[in-house]
Image (cartoon, grey):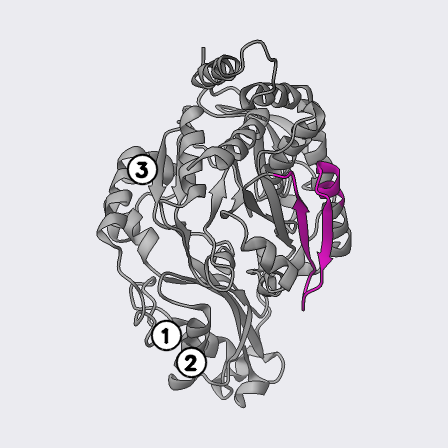
């Protein structure tokens, strides 16, 4: 008998012993009925995900966004949310939904309904026509944009709500859900959604908020993140017209002997943003407020280094060494503690076959910075602009498209402790990670005026986020890793644990 089965048996026996001769529903019997409904709903649950993937919204391209928000509102209503409202913002609309089950406690849920851009030519199958295929070492996976980031885990959570409905059982907690359509462009307007009085009031009543995830590794282990870095997404544009030097448009390359190059101007500006090592930020004052790792954070990182496979990590990233050829634990410390300034893309002039002998009049670079406590998005933007001006590049146009502050949640928060209990029940060993190197807008929740714990939760596995052939595991051949139905059951148990944990 599994650990979960033993728990059900003991809880059921205790309920009978307390009320001899009376057949009453207990949490254990409710749970058994809900889990049976998950199994019965397995195929329908996958189809819901397939249908959602077929209704994409790409905020970066403003592509099919009205359809995306309306479809998401529809699936929330289908899952049992009694109130589902569209929240206007300065950009793409958000969603506010509530489900009142009459419970004593309330849990917050964060959704994103937008997805990353795609180049269909890079995919093995159409990115919005979710396709089932076999993945060696894992099992049957669903390939499609949004499969793991983030529609797959989000639908697994909604499938758990469908199971409660099908079983005729009330949720053990009330739910408050907020969703946005701009996560993939660094959430420039998400703060407007949570600032709506009705939304703010509901969020402040929760015991914390989680974003559904699916992060089990091949060994079944899961890292519980106590925070995340904050992003600053921006674009730098160098043009002869704005600079006052160089051409207003492309001219023949032979003229470079007497005409300045806006492209080299941008390259020189970019070179001032990092030190000669190519990775340490060199923006003046960038490290003024950076908080060093605490002793506890270093202890947690050491535990993670011992539990995680360095070889698997290197293989996954396609690298032979970390920066400075540092050892695994040191590299993980850097990952959690170091702010970054990264070039995402750099475009100028002609890049087709052969040469074109031009001196381009314009060059553009897309960048992002990752921020750590106690940096802020506002501070980072101000220092970036001041740095460029001081270095003689004040003419370069700076366009900030999004960003937010780093996130931190205490390890004794109820949503963190509940995760640990549920993961253990499923045989998933956990480590506490001080900080996710990636970003999500959790700081909107952890900072005033909301001020609640925020994190991620979810069993299962997926990969390829932001890349071609993004996938989610549906039927697992690895006994240590949950498939899609197992991920849904994990959410069922997480809801029960949030209701009962002290």
Q: Secondary structure at mark 2?
A: helix
Give the label on residue 213, or none.
none
Q: What residue do we see at 37% from left, 29% from top?
A: 429
Image height of 495 relative to 372, above or below = above
Q: Estimate how packed mark 1 is, as few (under 14), some (14 to 19) or many (20 or more) residues with alpha carbons within 10 Å.
A: some
Q: Residues within 10 Å of mark 3 (few under 14, many from 20)?
A: some
Res. 281 image quadrant: bottom left
Q: CA distance from mark 3 to mark 2?
A: 38 Å
Q: Which residue is mark 2?
A: 388
In the image, is 38 to the left or to the right of 481? Answer: right
Label 2 to label 1: alpha-carbon separation: 8 Å
Look at discs 2 and 1 and give the one toward the viewer: 2
Q: Position of residue 73 (x, y in %)?
A: 73, 47
* Quadrant of the frame with the C terminus: top left
The answer to the question of whether label 1 and label 3 lie on touching residues, with beta carbons closer than 8 A, is: no
> Is 76 covered by the magenta stretch?
yes
Q: Is residue 466 left or right of residue 443?
A: right
Q: Which residue is mark 1?
A: 272
| Location of residue 282 with respect to 174 vertically, above or below | below
Q: Earlier in the sequence, mark 3 or mark 2?
A: 3
State yes or no: discs 2 and 1 in contact (Cβ < 8 Å).
yes
Residue 310: mark in rendering: 3
Q: In this picture, which residue range is highlighted in magenta?
A: 74-102
Residue at disc 3, secondary structure: helix
Rendered residue at 60%/22% (across/down): 30
**232 and 205: which one is in front?**
205
Q: Is residue 97 magenta?
A: yes
- What separation in Å lies between label 1 and label 3 (alpha carbons)? 32 Å
């Amino acid at each position: 008998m599994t650990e979960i089965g033993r728990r059900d048996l003991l809880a059921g026996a205790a309920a009978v012993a307390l009320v001899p001769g009376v057949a009453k529903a207990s949490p254990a019997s409710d749970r058994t009925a809900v889990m049976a409904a998950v199994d019965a709903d397995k195929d329908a649950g996958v189809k819901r995900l397939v249908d959602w993937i077929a209704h994409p919204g790409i905020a970066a391209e403003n592509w099919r966004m009205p359809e995306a928000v309306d479809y998401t509102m529809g699936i929330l209503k289908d899952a049992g949310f009694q109130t589902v409202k569209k929240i206007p913002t300065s950009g793409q609309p958000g969603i506010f939904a509530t489900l009142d089950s009459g419970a004593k406690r309330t849990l917050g849920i964060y959704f994103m309904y937008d997805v990353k851009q795609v180049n269909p030519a890079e995919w093995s199958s159409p990115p919005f026509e979710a396709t089932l295929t076999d993945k060696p070492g894992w099992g049957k996976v669903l390939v499609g944009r949004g499969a793991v980031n983030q529609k797959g885990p989000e639908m697994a959570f909604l499938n758990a709500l469908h199971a409660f409905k099908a079983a005729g059982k009330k949720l053990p907690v009330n739910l408050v859900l907020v969703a946005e359509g701009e996560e993939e462009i660094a959430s420039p307007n998400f703060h407007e959604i949570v600032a709506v009085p009705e939304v703010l009031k509901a969020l402040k009543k929760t015991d914390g908020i989680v974003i559904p995830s699916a992060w089990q590794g091949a060994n079944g282990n899961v890292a519980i993140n106590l925070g995340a870095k904050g992003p600053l997404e921006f674009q730098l544009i160098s043009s002869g017209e704005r600079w006052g030097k160089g051409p207003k448009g492309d001219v023949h390359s032979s003229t470079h002997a007497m005409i300045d190059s806006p492209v080299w101007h941008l390259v020189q500006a970019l070179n001032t943003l990092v030190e000669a090592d190519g990775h340490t930020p060199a923006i003046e004052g960038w490290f003024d407020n950076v908080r060093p790792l605490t002793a506890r954070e270093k202890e947690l990182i050491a535990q993670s280094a011992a539990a995680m496979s360095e070889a698997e990590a290197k293989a996954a990233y396609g690298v032979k060494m970390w920066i400075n050829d540092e050892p695994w634990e040191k590299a993980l410390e850097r990952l959690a503690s170091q702010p970054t300034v990264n070039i995402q893309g750099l475009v100028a002039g002609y890049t087709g076959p052969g040469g074109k002998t031009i001196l381009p009049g314009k060059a553009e670079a897309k960048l992002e910075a990752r921020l750590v406590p106690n940096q802020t998005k506002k501070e980072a933007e101000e220092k970036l602009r001041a740095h460029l001006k001081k270095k003689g590049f004040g003419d370069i146009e700076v366009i900030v498209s999004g960003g937010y502050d780093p996130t931190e949640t205490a390890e004794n928060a109820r949503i963190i402790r509940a995760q640990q209990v549920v993961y253990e029940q499923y045989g998933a060993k956990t480590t506490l990670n001080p900080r996710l190197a990636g970003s999500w807008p959790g700081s909107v929740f952890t900072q005033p005026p909301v001020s609640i714990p925020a994190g991620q939760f979810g069993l299962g596995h997926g990969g390829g986020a932001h890349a071609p052939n993004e996938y989610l595991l549906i039927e697992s051949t690895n006994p240590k890793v949950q498939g899609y139905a197992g991920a849904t059951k994990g959410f069922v148990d997480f809801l029960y644990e949030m209701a009962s944990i002290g």
